[in-house]
Image: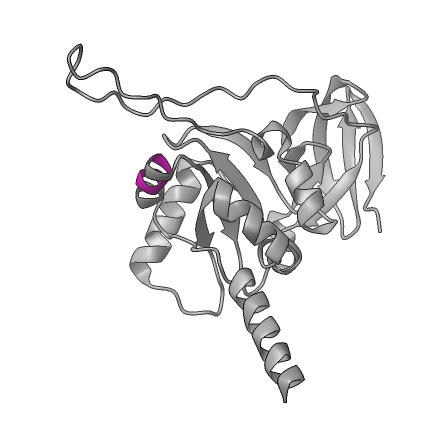
Amino acid sequence: MHRLILLILLTWTQLSRAEGLEWLGDLESAKEKAKQENKFILVYFTGSDWCPWCKKLSSEVFNQPDFVDFARAKFVPVEADFPRWRPIGNLQMEANKALQDKLHVSGYPTVIILTPDGQEIHRLGYVAGGPSAFISQLGPIAKAQIVSAPPPPRELEPRRRPAAFVPIPPETPIHYGALTLKAISGAKNRRMVLINNASLMTGETAKVKAENHDVVVCCKEIHDDSVLITCDGKPMELKLGK
C-alpha cells in the first residue's frame, strides 16, 4: 500500500513538472510579465495537430521536466498555434497570424527569443537531442540574466527609472562545422530546412556559418530527406542525418 502511494505521488510530481509552463497567447501580455519578472520571451510557432517536427519538439523538449525547470526561471512562453483540425477561436487565430507577420515567420516549428521589449535576439527550429541539445543552441542566452537597475535615491530623483536590459557578455562563439542539414519541416508546399544556424525555404538565400566563416547558401529544392543548394555559387546536395 505504501509503495502504491509513493508511486502515485511520484507520478503526480512528474506530471506537475511537465505541465508547469504557462503558455500565453498574447505578446503584449507576455512583454508586461517579462518586464515584471526580468525574463526573456520565448515565442513558439507551431502546427500542433499536423506538423511532425512541431510534435517532436513539443514532446522531446518543451514537455520534458528538465526544460520546464530551465524555462520557468528564464522565459515567459508564448504559443502561436496554427492547427488544421483542432478548434481555435477566431480572435486567437487572428492574433497568431498578426504575430506571424510581425516576426516574419514562414515555417513551423519556429522558436524566437525576444527581450522584454520585444526585440528579437535569437531564432531556431527543431533541434534533435532533447532539452540539453536545445538549450545548448541558445548559446549565451542560456546563461544571460536581465537585471533591473536599482532606483536612484529619492532625494535626487523621485521618479523610478525603467528596468534596464543588461547586454549579454561576450562568450566563446558556437563552433559550426561543415554544412549540415539538421531538419526539414512544414507541409510539402511550404517546407523549410534548418542548415547549421539558418532556416530557409525554397528560393531563399542566407549567410550560414560553416567552419568558422560565413558562406552564402541558396536553397534550390527541398525533398523528403535532402535539399539541393548552392554554396557560394557551387551546387551541393545535403542529406538529412539519421
Camera sees residue 107: no
Magenta-span inclusion, residue 68: no
Give the residue at x 69% y 45%: 132
| Residue 95 coordinates in the image, percent (x, y) | 34, 49
Location of residue 235 by image quarter:
top right
| Residue 110 coordinates in the image, percent (x, y) | 56, 44
Which contiguous range is marked in magenta?
A: 31-35
Q: Is residue 177 left or right of residue 20?
A: right
Name the residue at the top extreme.
156
Indicate how the structure is coloured in the image: one colour
Q: Nearer the viewer, residue 29 or 186?
A: 29
Q: Nearer the viewer, residue 141 or 125?
A: 141
How many numbered badges does the structure rendering display? 0
| Residue 118 coordinates in the image, percent (x, y) | 39, 32
Give the residue at x 70% y 51%: 130
**In which quadrant of the rendered image does the N terminus lie?**
bottom right
Location of residue 201 by image quarter:
top right
**Position of 191 relative to 237 (above/below):** below
**Position of 87 relative to 189 (above/below):** below
Give the residue at x 73% y 41%: 221
